[in-house]
Image: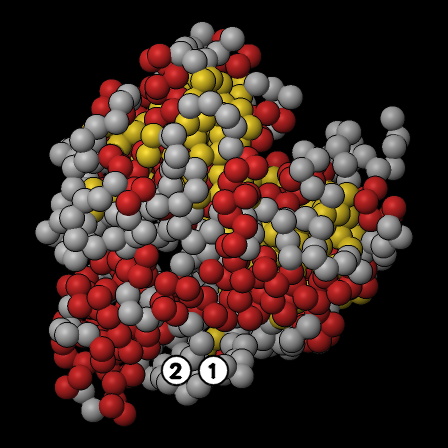
C-alpha cells in the first residue's frame, strides 16, 4: 500500500483565502443580519472572477464558483496545474440554489390564482421565468464538471452527495485509490455557501438562531461559507516529481448508524492526541479539541475536506501530528490523521 | 497464475448474485425484461401532475400508491420507494442475510423542496418571502428529515442494514454506472466482500421536466407517446424522462462460491473519462467517450472483438446519438457490434440508467437475446450502426456486453458485463 500525502491545499472560509489565515484559530466573523434569524460565517472579500473565464462564470452559481476557485488554489499549491490530464477528481456537493426573485414573485401571486388553476399557472410561470442555464448551476455534479472544464482535470470525475458524511466519504475513497495505486493523483474536496435561503429552509430546524455562540454551547449549526480541496498522491509520486509534501494522510475513517450510538462510534475511530473537531454543533469529541467550527462555522459537504486541508496546512507549518474528527449534524462520524512526512 | 477467483490483473473477480429492476414496463426484473424483449414502450402521458402547459407531456412514468392527483410523491420519496423495491428484489435473489454484509452505493438524483411542500409552508408563513418560508419550514419536522440529500440513502441503509456511510453517487446520467464502479473498486481493494449497488430515479417532477425542456433536451413529440423516444433515427429530437430503479448485489467470486450462491454474471471491467469540453456537449473529437469505452475494455482485459452487444447511452438527442456513433467506430472500427438503446422503451432514467442498463446486459447474455431499439422506421444511415431495429434478436455465443453512460458535466462511464 502506498503512503498517501497531501501536496496541495485550496482553502476559502470567512477567515480568508489560502493556508495562512487557517494556521491558528481566528476570531469568528459572523453576519447575524443578512439571514436573520440565522447567523452565518460569510464569504470573505474575494475576487474570483480573474480565475474563472467569463463564459464559464455566467453558467455557475456562487457555490460552484467557490469550489472551482478553491480547486484551482489546491492545484497551484501542489504545483500540479500542468498535471491535470489524467488526474482524478472526487467532489462532495449538495447542489441547489434557486432563482429567489422568481420564487418570491410566484409565492406572492399564487394565492390570487383560483385553486383549480394554480397548478397549470405555476408550471407556465416556471417555464416562462426560469433561466435555462440555471439548471446546470444547480446540479451537484456540475461543480466537478466545472472543475474539469476550467482546470482541465480529465481522469475520472465522481460526485458524492449527502451533507457532512459525503465529504468524509469523498476523501476516504480518494485516499484509498491512491493507497491502492489505482490513481496517481486525486483532487478531492467540496464547497458550501452559507448565505442561501434554500439550504436554510431545509436545515432551518437544525440551525442556531441569534448571534454567535461557540460550537460547544449551541445545539444548532451556524452555517459557514467554506471550500476545501486537497491534492493527494503517493509519497513516492510526490518525491519523484520533486514537490513539497505538506503532510501524510492516514486512517481516513467514516462510519454511520443508529443515532443513539454515535458517541461510541466516534470514540472508536478517534485517535489519541491533539485534534481538530469538525463538530457542527454541541456533541461528542469536543472536549480537549479545537472546535474548527467556532471560526469557520458548519460547512456541510465541505466540512471534512476543509478540516483535512486545515490540518495539513498546520502540520506543514509546525510539524507533528494532528487528527481531525467529528460528525455530521444528521448522520455519519469521521476522522483522519495528518502527520509530518517521514 | 490461472486462479479462477482472480481476473486478468490479479484482482478479485466481481460477480453478480442478485438483480432487481423497476421500470415503466414492470415492477420487477422479469416483467420489465419481458416487456423489453417484446419491444413494448412504457412511455405514456403524464397523469400524476398537470402537464398541460409543458412542452413535453409524456414520460416513462411509474405511478405509486402515494401519488395523489396534483400532489405527486416528491422526487426523494419516489427514489426511496423505487430503490427499495429494486434493492429488495436483488437482495432476495442473492440469498444474503439481513443485515446486508457490506456497504450501499447508489446512483441517485439531487432533489430539493418542491412546490407542493413550498405551498404548504406558504400557508404557515407570515409573508411570501424565502425568509418567512425558512421560519415556517423550521417548524415542520418532516422538511429537515426528508429533504436532506442523504435522506433516501439513510433510510435505505437502515432498511437493508448495510455497513458504513452509504454513498449517494451523482454523475448525472452516468450515476448508476459510477455507483457500480465505486462498488467494484471497494471489493477489489478488499474493503468489502459484498456491496449493494444500483441506481434510482424519481426526477420526473414538474419543475425538472420544465428545466430539461428549457435546455432543449426533451423530445417535443408526444402523439403517440410510444413513438417519441427514437434513438438513432433521423427524426430523433430529444429524450423522454423516465422513472426507474435497479438493484445489483455484487460479491467477490470467492465470497459468492464459498456460500454456494448462484452466479448470474460478472462485472468484468469499468472505465471512465471526464470531458473538459462543455457542460452538456461531448468534445467534437469523441475521444472522451471512446476513451471511456476503451478504458472499460482495458480494465476488463478484453479486446473490442470480445464485445458482442452494446447497450447504448442512446438518449435520442441529435447530439448524443451522433457522438456515440462516432465513438463506437473509433473503438470498433467500421463494423461495430449490434448496439441498441433500451431508452427507446423506458425513456431516460437518468441516475438509474447506468444500473438498469447493466442489468439488461446481464439478462441479454443470460437469455442470448438482444433487446431492440424501437421506433426504427427511419434509422439514420449516416451512423452506420446495427441498432437491432424494432424486434429482439436471438443470438449465439454472446459472452460479454458493454453498457455506455454519458452524463451532463462530461462524466462518461462504461461497464463491461460478462455471463455466468
Residue B193 located left or right of residue A284: right
Percent x, y of residue A71? 34, 31
Q: Secondary structure at mark 2?
A: loop
Chain under callout 2:
B
Residue A19 visible in the displayed image: yes
| Residue bearing mark 2 | B71
Report the residue at 28% width, 21% height from top: A23
Percent x, y of residue B315? 51, 60
Q: Considering the image in quadrants, where does the N terminus of chain B appear?
A: top right
- Between the residue at mark 1 and the residue at mark 2, the CA separation in whole angstroms equals 7 Å
Percent x, y of residue B247? 65, 60
| Residue bearing mark 1 | B67
Chain under callout 1:
B
Q: Nearer the viewer, residue A194 or B49?
A: A194
Q: Nearer the viewer, residue B393 or B125?
A: B125
Residue B410 located left or right of residue B39: left
Q: Is the C-beta separation of discs 1 and 2 under 8 Å?
A: yes
Residue B173 visible in the displayed image: no
Report the residue at 44% width, 34% height from top: A325
Amino acid at each position: 500500500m502506498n503512503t498517501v500525502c497531501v501536496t496541495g491545499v485550496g482553502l476559502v472560509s470567512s477567515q480568508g483565502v489560502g493556508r495562512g489565515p487557517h494556521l491558528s484559530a481566528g476570531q469568528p466573523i459572523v453576519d447575524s443580519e443578512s439571514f436573520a434569524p440565522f447567523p452565518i460565517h460569510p464569504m470573505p472579500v474575494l475576487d474570483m472572477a480573474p480565475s474563472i473565464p467569463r463564459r464559464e462564470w455566467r453558467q455557475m452559481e456562487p457555490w460552484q464558483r467557490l469550489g472551482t476557485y478553491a480547486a484551482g488554489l489546491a492545484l497551484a499549491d501542489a504545483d500540479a496545474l500542468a498535471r491535470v490530464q489524467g488526474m482524478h477528481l472526487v467532489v462532495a456537493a449538495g447542489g441547489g440554489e434557486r432563482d429567489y426573485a422568481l420564487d418570491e414573485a410566484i409565492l406572492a401571486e399564487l394565492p390570487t390564482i383560483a385553486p383549480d388553476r394554480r397548478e397549470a399557472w405555476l408550471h407556465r410561470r416556471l417555464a416562462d421565468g426560469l433561466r435555462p442555464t440555471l439548471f446546470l448551476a444547480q446540479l451537484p455534479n456540475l461543480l466537478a464538471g466545472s472543475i474539469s472544464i476550467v482546470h482541465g482535470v480529465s481522469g475520472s470525475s465522481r460526485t458524492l452527495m449527502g451533507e457532512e458524511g459525503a465529504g468524509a466519504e469523498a476523501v476516504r475513497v480518494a485516499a484509498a485509490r491512491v493507497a491502492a495505486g489505482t490513481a496517481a493523483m486525486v483532487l478531492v474536496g467540496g464547497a458550501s455557501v452559507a448565505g442561501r435561503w434554500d439550504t436554510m429552509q431545509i436545515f432551518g430546524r437544525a440551525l442556531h438562531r441569534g448571534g454567535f455562540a461557540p460550537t460547544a454551547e449551541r445545539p444548532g449549526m451556524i452555517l459557514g461559507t467554506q471550500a476545501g480541496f486537497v491534492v493527494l498522491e503517493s509519497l513516492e509520486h510526490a518525491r519523484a516529481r520533486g514537490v513539497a509534501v505538506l503532510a501524510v494522510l492516514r486512517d481516513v475513517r467514516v462510519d454511520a448508524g443508529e443515532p443513539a450510538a454515535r458517541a461510541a462510534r466516534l470514540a472508536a475511530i478517534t485517535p489519541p492526541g491533539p485534534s481538530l473537531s469538525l463538530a457542527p454543533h454541541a456533541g461528542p469529541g469536543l472536549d480537549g479539541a479545537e472546535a474548527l467550527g467556532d471560526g469557520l462555522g458548519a460547512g456541510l459537504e465541505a466540512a471534512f475536506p476543509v478540516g483535512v486541508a486545515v490540518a495539513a496546512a498546520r502540520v506543514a507549518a509546525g510539524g507533528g501530528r494532528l487528527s481531525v474528527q467529528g460528525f455530521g449534524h444528521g448522520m455519519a462520524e469521521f476522522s483522519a490523521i495528518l502527520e509530518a512526512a517521514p | 497464475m490461472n486462479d479462477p477467483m482472480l481476473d486478468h490483473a490479479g484482482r478479485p473477480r466481481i460477480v453478480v448474485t442478485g438483480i432487481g429492476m423497476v421500470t415503466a414496463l414492470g415492477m420487477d426484473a422479469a416483467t420489465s425484461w419481458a416487456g423489453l424483449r417484446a419491444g413494448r414502450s412504457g412511455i405514456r402521458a403524464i397523469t400524476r401532475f398537470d402537464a398541460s402547459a409543458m412542452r413535453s407531456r409524456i414520460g416513462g412514468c411509474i405511478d405509486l400508491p402515494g401519488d395523489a392527483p396534483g400532489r405527486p410523491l416528491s422526487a426523494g420519496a419516489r427514489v426511496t420507494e423505487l430503490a427499495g423495491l429494486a434493492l429488495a428484489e436483488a437482495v432476495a435473489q442473492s440469498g444474503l442475510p439481513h443485515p446486508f454484509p457490506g456497504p450501499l452505493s447508489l446512483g441517485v438524483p439531487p432533489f430539493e423542496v418542491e412546490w407542493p411542500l413550498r405551498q404548504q409552508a406558504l400557508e404557515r408563513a407570515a409573508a411570501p418571502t424565502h425568509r418567512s418560508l425558512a421560519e415556517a419550514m423550521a417548524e415542520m419536522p418532516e422538511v429537515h428529515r426528508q429533504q436532506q440529500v442523504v435522506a433516501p440513502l439513510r433510510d435505505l441503509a437502515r432498511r437493508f442494514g448495510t455497513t458504513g456511510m452509504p454513498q449517494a453517487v451523482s454523475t448525472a446520467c452516468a450515476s448508476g454506472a459510477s455507483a457500480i464502479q465505486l462498488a467494484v473498486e471497494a471489493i477489489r481493494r478488499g474493503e468489502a466482500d459484498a456491496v449493494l449497488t444500483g441506481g434510482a430515479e424519481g426526477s420526473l417532477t414538474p419543475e425538472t421536466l420544465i428545466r430539461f425542456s428549457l435546455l432543449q433536451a426533451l423530445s417535443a413529440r408526444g402523439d403517440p407517446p410510444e413513438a417519441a423516444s427514437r434513438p438513432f433515427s433521423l427524426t430523433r429530437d430529444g429524450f423522454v424522462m423516465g422513472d426507474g430503479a435497479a438493484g445489483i448485489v455484487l460479491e467477490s467470486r470467492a465470497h459468492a462460491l464459498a456460500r454456494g450462491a448462484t452466479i448470474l454474471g460478472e462485472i468484468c471491467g469499468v472505465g471512465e473519462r471526464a470531458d473538459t469540453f462543455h457542460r452538456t456537449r461531448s468534445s467534437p473529437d469523441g475521444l472522451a467517450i471512446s476513451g471511456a469505452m476503451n478504458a472499460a475494455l482495458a480494465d476488463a482485459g478484453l479486446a473490442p472483438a470480445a464485445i458482442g452487444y452494446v447497450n447504448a447511452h442512446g438518449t435520442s438527442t441529435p447530439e448524443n446519438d451522433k457522438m456515440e456513433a462516432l465513438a463506437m467506430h473509433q473503438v470498433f472500427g467500421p463494423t461495430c457490434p449490434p448496439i441498441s438503446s433500451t431508452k427507446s422503451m423506458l425513456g431516460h432514467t437518468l441516475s438509474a440508467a447506468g444500473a438498469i442498463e447493466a442489468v439488461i446486459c446481464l439478462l441479454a447474455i443470460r437469455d442470448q437475446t438482444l433487446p431492440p431499439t424501437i421506433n426504427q422506421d427511419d434509422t439514420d444511415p449516416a451512423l452506420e450502426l446495427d441498432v437491432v431495429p424494432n424486434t429482439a434478436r436471438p443470438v449465439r455465443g454472446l459472452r460479454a456486453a458493454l453498457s455506455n453512460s454519458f452524463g451532463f458535466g462530461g462524466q462518461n462511464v462504461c461497464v463491461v458485463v460478462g455471463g455466468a
